[in-house]
Image (cartoon, rainbow, N blue to C red):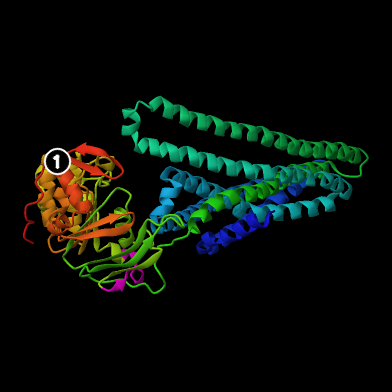
């Protein structure tokens, strides 16, 4: 067996360690049952030998009663072992899933974006089911099978060594056939995992983007793509079934030949009086039971080879680089004031391709700073670095003078509220979505947050009010309603730092007016970083920061930047003419809006 498969199998013992005592007790019971099974042919020998002796019928009846009692005891022990083994199996399954889920929650966003949700879920399910099946097969059967083989061979040698030698000539054949087939099976298993992960990664994207699929009339195309992938993958399975069938037939043929030759030679010995009929019956019983365990050992070898693919999937997740993980000694921080500072911050998603270059920015407690600039300039990247969704490749980010890497991720993010352009709502009640950041919040607190977010009135008009299920991604609600739910969620969380990422860019005028009122309440006494293209959203900020090509090109108030005549002034001028443009796209028509009036008093 390759060292990789052995090392992976050894590593997987960490999942079993919490259940080692229960496993030991089940193994002891399995060994007892294996020993009882090895006695069966000897009992059969005694039964048949008694039939030819004076008074043998009485002894035969007595032996039959004893055999019946033995079978009842064995059935009870097997039932108890089955229950106990399933308890261990479920426990190991839970242990693996707990570790994987914990790791997935801790891994950076880059991992999930790279792997894809559907692919990750398929890899997890196939990896865990494959490992648990292999664990059960090997843990509960390997040692009992070895014990049965040893006892059987010893008994056969004792009964008639010539027949035993004949049988043992054929015994290694199934193992050799299985060993020859194992490498191909492992490669096939790896191809299947990769194919199914790719298929379901795309399928998950299609389901998540069904509006786009239907909007472009691509239902049949996506259906064909999915079914073609399934058909090709099934062809891999079909070819594998033929190969496994052939190797299985050869293994069965080896066992059949051994049984027939033993029957012929044993019959000859019995006809000459060299062995009794009972001995021949016992031998045939051992042969039937011998090749089963040999086949079991062969299957165990093949299982170990194939399970390495499952373990590669499991450890591929558990060993994934957590570049934003908590540093040793990271501390939980208490209530922050909200002073955010970026010092010479540099970042790139790919080595040698920086998205941000030498960013220096200080946001004071309670200050609202708007970030504007062309799409792709690094605005959203900057705020994801503050949340430690990615790790800066250079420079330092501090909150209240503390490096964010000296804080635990949970304590940092618990004090940052985020409202996105397309807020994610879960397929749950309105109440649960508002209380997502504070599950223990009271109904009064939830309703107060909804009122402040201009959401209470439309929630009361819903069929079940706060108990209304919003469906997946909040599809039951309009864009403006989803946005107000997200604002209520941020208000209820009551964080000292707030991030608004294009929170109003996709809304109509009526929805925007309602949300602007809600945002004005949300921004009160909080440090806020506001990303927007709509100038009506940013003109009242304490400062406006223009980011171009990953660098800060302008910074100041609305009027200061107008006087400089730079990027921001040009943006204002274009909007006053009725157009809003970006450097990477054609102009689009917007409603005229005078932006040169004095800012609101803060």
Residue named by callout 1: 577
Residue 477, image x and y in percent?
A: 20, 39
| Residue found at the far right of this picture | 272
Residue 22: horizontal and vertical position, in percent? Answer: 53, 61
Q: Which of these two is toward me, 568 or 461?
A: 568
Q: Quadrant of the C terminus?
A: bottom left
Give the camera-side residue of 493 and 71.
493
In this rendering, the count of numbered labels is 1
In the rendered view, would you say 480 is above or below 600? above
Question: Relative to 329, does residue 325 appear above or below in the rendering?
Answer: above
- On whether residue 409 falls in the magenta region, the answer is yes
Magenta-colored stretch includes residue 44? no
Residue found 43% across the figure and 45% down from its top: 116
What residue is shown at x 49% (from left), y 42% (from top)? 197
Q: Give the percent coordinates (x, y) of residue 184.
A: 67, 42
- Horizontal side of residue 122 vs 439, given as left or right: right
Element carrying mark 1: loop
Residue closest to the eye, 56 or 561? 561
Q: Which residues are magenta?
A: 401-410
Where is residue 280, by image quadrant? top right
Nearest the viewer among 58 and 477 is 477
Q: Residues within 10 Å of mark 1 (few under 14, many from 20)?
A: some
| Residue 414 shown left or right of residue 4 in the figure | left
């Amino acid at each position: 067996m390759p060292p990789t498969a052995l090392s992976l199998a050894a590593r997987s013992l960490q999942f079993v360690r919490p259940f080692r005592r229960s496993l030991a007790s089940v193994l002891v019971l399995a060994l007892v049952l294996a020993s009882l099974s090895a006695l069966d042919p000897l009992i059969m020998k005694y039964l048949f030998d008694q039939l030819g002796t004076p008074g043998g019928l009485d002894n035969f009846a007595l032996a039959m009663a004893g055999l019946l009692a033995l079978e009842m005891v064995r059935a009870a022990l097997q039932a108890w072992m089955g229950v106990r083994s399933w308890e261990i199996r479920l426990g190991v399954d839970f242990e693996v899933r707990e570790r994987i889920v914990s790791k997935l929650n801790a891994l950076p966003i880059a991992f999930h974006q790279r792997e894809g949700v559907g692919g990750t879920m398929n890899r997890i399910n196939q990896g865990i089911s494959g490992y648990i099946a292999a664990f059960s097969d090997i843990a509960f059967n390997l040692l009992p099978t070895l014990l049965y083989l040893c006892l059987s061979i010893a008994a056969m040698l004792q009964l008639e060594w010539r027949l035993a030698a004949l049988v043992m000539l054929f015994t290694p054949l199934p193992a050799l056939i299985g060993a020859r087939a194992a490498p191909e099976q492992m490669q096939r298993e790896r191809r299947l995992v990769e194919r199914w992960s790719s298929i379901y990664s795309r399928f998950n994207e299609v389901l998540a983007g069904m509006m786009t699929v239907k909007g472009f009339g691509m239902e049949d195309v996506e259906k064909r793509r999915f079914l073609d992938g399934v058909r090709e993958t099934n062809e891999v399975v079909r070819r594998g079934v033929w190969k496994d069938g052939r190797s299985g037939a050869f293994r069965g043929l080896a066992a059949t030949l051994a049984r027939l030759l033993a029957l012929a030679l044993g019959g000859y010995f019995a006809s000459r009086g060299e062995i009794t009929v009972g001995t021949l019956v016992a031998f045939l019983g051992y042969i039937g039971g011998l090749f089963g365990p040999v086949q079991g050992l062969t299957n165990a070898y093949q299982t170990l080879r194939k399970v390495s693919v499952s373990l590669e999937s499991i450890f591929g997740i558990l060993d994934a680089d957590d570049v934003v993980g908590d540093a040793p000694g990271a501390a939980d921080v208490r209530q922050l004031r909200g002073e955010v500072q970026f010092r010479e911050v540099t970042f790139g998603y790919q080595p040698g391709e920086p998205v941000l270059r030498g960013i220096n920015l200080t946001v004071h407690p309670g200050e609202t700073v708007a970030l504007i600039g062309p799409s792709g300039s690094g605005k959203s990247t900057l705020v994801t670095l503050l949340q430690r969704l990615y790790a800066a490749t250079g420079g330092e980010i501090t909150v209240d003078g503390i490096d964010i890497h000296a804080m635990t991720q949970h304590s940092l993010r618990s004090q940052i509220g985020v409202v996105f352009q397309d807020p994610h709502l879960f397929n749950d009640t309105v109440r649960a979505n508002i209380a997502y950041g504070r599950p223990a919040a009271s109904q009064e607190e939830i309703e107060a947050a909804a009122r402040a977010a201009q959401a209470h009135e439309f929630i009361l008009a819903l069929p079940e009010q706060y108990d209304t299920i919003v469906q997946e991604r909040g599809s039951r609600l309009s864009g403006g309603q989803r946005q107000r739910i997200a604002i209520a969620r941020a208000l209820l969380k009551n964080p000292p730092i707030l991030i608004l990422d294009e929170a109003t860019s996709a809304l109509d005028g009526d929805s925007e007016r309602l949300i602007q009122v809600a945002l004005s309440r949300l921004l009160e006494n909080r440090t806020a970083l506001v990303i927007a293209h709509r100038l009506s959203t940013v003109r009242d900020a304490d400062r406006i920061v223009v980011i171009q090509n990953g660098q800060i090109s302008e910074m100041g108030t609305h009027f200061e930047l107008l006087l400089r005549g730079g990027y921001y002034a040009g943006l204002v001028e274009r909007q006053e003419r009725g157009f809003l443009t970006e450097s990477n796209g054609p102009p689009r028509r917007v409603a005229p809006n005078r932006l040169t009036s004095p800012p609101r008093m803060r």
